[in-house]
Image (cartoon, rainbow, N blue to C red):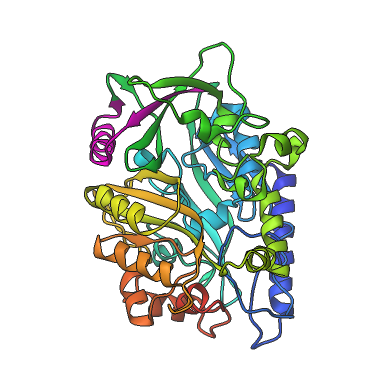
Amino acid sequence: MTALAGRLHDAGVQRLLDSYRAIPPGSPVRLAKRTSNLFRGRTPTDAPGLDTSGLTGVVSVDPAERTADVQGMCTYEDLVDATLPHGLTPLVVPQLRTITLGGAVTGLGIESASWRNGLPHESVLEMDVLTGSGEVVTCDPTDRHPDLFRGFPNSYGTLGYATRLRIELEPVGRTVSLRHVRFHDLDALVAAVGGIMDTGEHEGEPVDYLDGVVFTADESYLVLGRRSDESGPTSDYTGQGIFYRSIQHDGPRPTRDTLSTLDYLWRWDTDWFWCSRAFGAQNPLVRRVWPRRWLRSSVYWKLIALDRRFDVADRLEARKGRPPRERVVQDVEIPLSATADFLRWFLREVPIEPIWLCPLSLRDEESWTLYPLEPGERYVNVGFWSTVPVDPSAPAGATNRRIEDAVSERGGHKSLYSEAFYDEETFWRHYGGAHYPALKERYDPDHRLPDLYAKAVRGA
């Protein structure tokens, strides 16, 4: 860390502390940020927020040690831009450019390296956290506030906010070579995932990155990536090409593709996986005139905000004589052994496709306090993001509630970035309720921050 970088970081932390102290007692403490990757509402407030404007960058990169010191509000887009020139990336790079490192750690993140590297918080070596009591503390796994270190993931800003994180990095190549392997049977797909997680290869070729897409019960794919320094042309899915459509094929053998490492990391961002189709961005006529710089998740977020503000989608449905639609935007972790069963249930009961699959296994031998996945257990993150018609006779969030029940019945967990409908007893049983009160009392004794249930379920 250079002296200048250190001074700038210290100034950013001081600005944050000053803004915390300016918030009147009894007023909610929140981040003053215009963007978010959360799909749940929150109670409006006129209170000033925490000023994180000085905490948006990379403080330093150490290529020899393969580490980086990163400010909490730094986006992964900016983080990768700082590390990739050194031939390095974070161990897990979530799919969307504007996800922040602090957000991925406190709110969980995942990607196609998670089958071998776990979740983003598992590559954190130490971090500084502004706690609810207004104190910045340094925590690590062993000596300094280890309870906060292990309790911070999945706390969603209810214990504090990360101001600096030291993370591990890993070497990457110039390109990523891809194989798109088709399956006609979900059990066969799940068996192949287990084989890759056991051996690190598929049909004799090494696998570094692993995710997949389910279109129907008899059309699903694994996308197998291998780090490479091979020269040659690469595909471009940042313009007219649509990545998820490139996966599909009818032949018995895998199709192959090559992307630059940078384009591979952001392959899902251009079309927000496949969600850009809701805005017409995949219509060939529209796509030809849609500026390339607007083909990115941050633009679609702005369109979502406009829809929420003016209720555009439901108004259009009403004009067609249709009921409003329930938003079903979720990621759930299902044990590998139950994944095929869950997928069959979902395809039968919920009219949403495609579905994203991302296998994961914890690196750590110890569970994390507020998101207690089992060490040694293999999971598959199942992601589905769309809407379904509302049944006027059913309670609010009826489809989401059924999904919550189906996940629990199979021993899974659900990420909390979107709406949740659990009753309080069930919620705390899933999300570390035996340990959370002690963490809250120690790091936010005056309850300046909402508790996790209030934030995740009640929208505080």
- 220 vs 298, nearest the viewer: 220
- Residue at the extreme bottom of the image, as rendered: 26
Q: Residue at x 52, y 33 (%)?
A: 245
Q: Can residue 139 be seen in this view?
A: no
Viewer-closest of 100 and 253: 253
- Residue visible at 59% across and 30% down in the picture: 263
Residue at 27% of width from left, 21% of height from top? 203
Q: Within the image, what quadrant is residue 273 found in?
A: top right
Report whether residue 79 is seen.
yes
Q: Can you give x and y, in whole percent of width and height, for residue 40 in the image?
A: 56, 68
Could you tell me residue 369's position as x and y percent?
35, 65
Magenta residues (range): 176-201
204 vs 133: above or below: above
Q: Position of residue 111 (x, y in %)?
A: 46, 43
Q: In which quarter of the image is the N terminus?
A: top right
Above or below, 125 against 16 in this view is: above
The x and y percentages for residue 94 are 52, 45
Residue 73 placement: quadrant: bottom right
Quarter of the figure that contains the C terminus? bottom right
Is 415 situated above or below 135?
A: above
| Residue situated furthest front in the rendering | 321
Residue 1 horizontal side relative to residue 341, left or right: right
Left or right: 406 with respect to 356?
A: left
In magenta stretch: residue 142: no
